Image (cartoon, grey):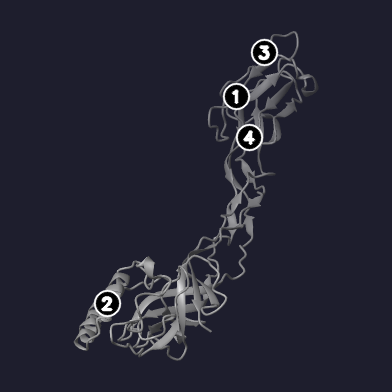
Amino acid sequence: MKNRVRRRALIVPLLGLAFGSLLSGCPDAINIAEFYEEDAGDADAGSDAAGDDDEDGGPSTNGGDGGCEFACEGECVPLRPGDFSFPLLAWIGPNETAAPPCPDAAPVEQFIWHGDPIVPPSACGECTCGPSVGFCSLPSSIVAQDAPCTSAEGATTTPTDPPESWDGTCAPDNAIPADACGTNKPCIQSVTIGPLAITDEACTALGSSTAPLEAASWGLFARLCEGITSTGYGGCSPAELCVPRREEGFRQCVQRPGIHDCPAEGYAERFVLYEDFNDNRACSACTCDAPEGSECASTVSLHADASCTSPIASADVSSAGPTCLDLTTPGQAIGAKSATAPVYHSGTCQAHGGELLGAVELLGARTLCCLP
């Protein structure tokens, strides 16, 4: 809905008016033509470019002492009040489809404005989060202690770590022989296996918070039309202006930028209209917090030989933390280790978003004051 402003110069018919009136012996016509010519160049249609004529609404409208009379061929209306424009014909109704075009007497469509903005109640869709997804990495550390798990703190340790980026296949890396610690006491009594690692973990945001909102609209439409009679504004009493006669459905109105009060008398019926609006409403995007409650799990086995055919112990391990495993027969060699493929167990995420943001911004306020 864009405001449409079209300006047509009214100089030619006014000069014709002046020339015809001079042939009839009416010298005041030149004053009227000059006045209207100045007004035709005003950037705001219908406003008075000649501020000195505010009090009496323009040059003489009744012929003065020039020996001629201007008979208004339109309609005599009160002078424009204060900083308001000269009168315009306005059609004001609920929708544009019912609005007639500008009448022949006022053929220049100066403005299309709107009022009574309608902003439908709007609510954003609920945001939710799907189950988390992620990737698991097997433990990167396995350490043997010369004490059982209950006394492992402070014990002598011997690393038997798997290879980097271990995929669980049989790995003889960093093997520990059975006699590594001598014969005084068993060297290997327990083993601590490090936790699995979770990487690239996230939840997918779900919901309809980005769905389009129901569009705002207008409840009032106004078409403002301008024209001029064959006598210009002349032909009425000094307290009046001659303007094109209103047709059915049209009103005689004056307008002013901004929001203002209307006069208590005369142009007293007030309409606040706007050139356009910007609908800045939107729903905030759905997002998800970091996952909670997820876990990676695997089973790690220790073998006495390098080919993983002689298991000596196994333990279920997870990403929750390290796991300590007592050996059934202390002092055995650790020739290799193996692990099952890790399994990711999904967690949950807290959802955010789906909040209504912004508002409908009304642009180009205008006050229209009309005769009853």
Query: Mark 3 vs mark 2: which is more N-terminal?
Result: 2
View extreme (right): residue: 150
Give 328 or 54, whichever is nearer the viewer. 54
Which label sits in the foreground, 1 or 2? 2
Give 162 or 57, whichever is nearer the viewer. 57
Marks 3/2: CA distance? Answer: 121 Å
Q: What element carries label 4?
A: loop
Three-letter code for the amino acid on which mark 1 is drawn: Asp
Which label sits in the foreground, 3 or 2? 2
- Above-or-below relation of 367 to 286: below
Three-letter code for the amino acid on which mark 4 is drawn: Leu
> Where residue 170 appears, x then y in whole percent?
57, 31
Q: What element carries label 1?
A: loop
Q: In this view, does 122 lie to the left or right of 250?
A: right
Marks 4/2: CA distance? Answer: 93 Å
Query: Mark 1 vs mark 4: which is more N-terminal?
Result: 1
Three-letter code for the amino acid on which mark 3 is drawn: Asp
Give 290 or 110, whichever is nearer the viewer. 110
Q: According to the image, label 2 marks what residue?
A: 33
Q: According to the image, label 4 marks what residue?
A: 196
Three-letter code for the amino acid on which mark 2 is drawn: Ala
Q: In this view, does 46 lie to the left or right of 122?
A: left
Q: According to the image, label 1 marks what residue?
A: 161
Query: Mark 3 vs mark 1: which is more N-terminal?
Result: 1
Query: Mark 4 vs mark 2: which is more N-terminal?
Result: 2
> Where residue 273 appears, x then y in whole percent?
50, 72
The quadrant where residue 108 appears: bottom left
Q: Is residue 242 left or right of residue 352?
A: left
Q: According to the image, label 3 marks what residue?
A: 179
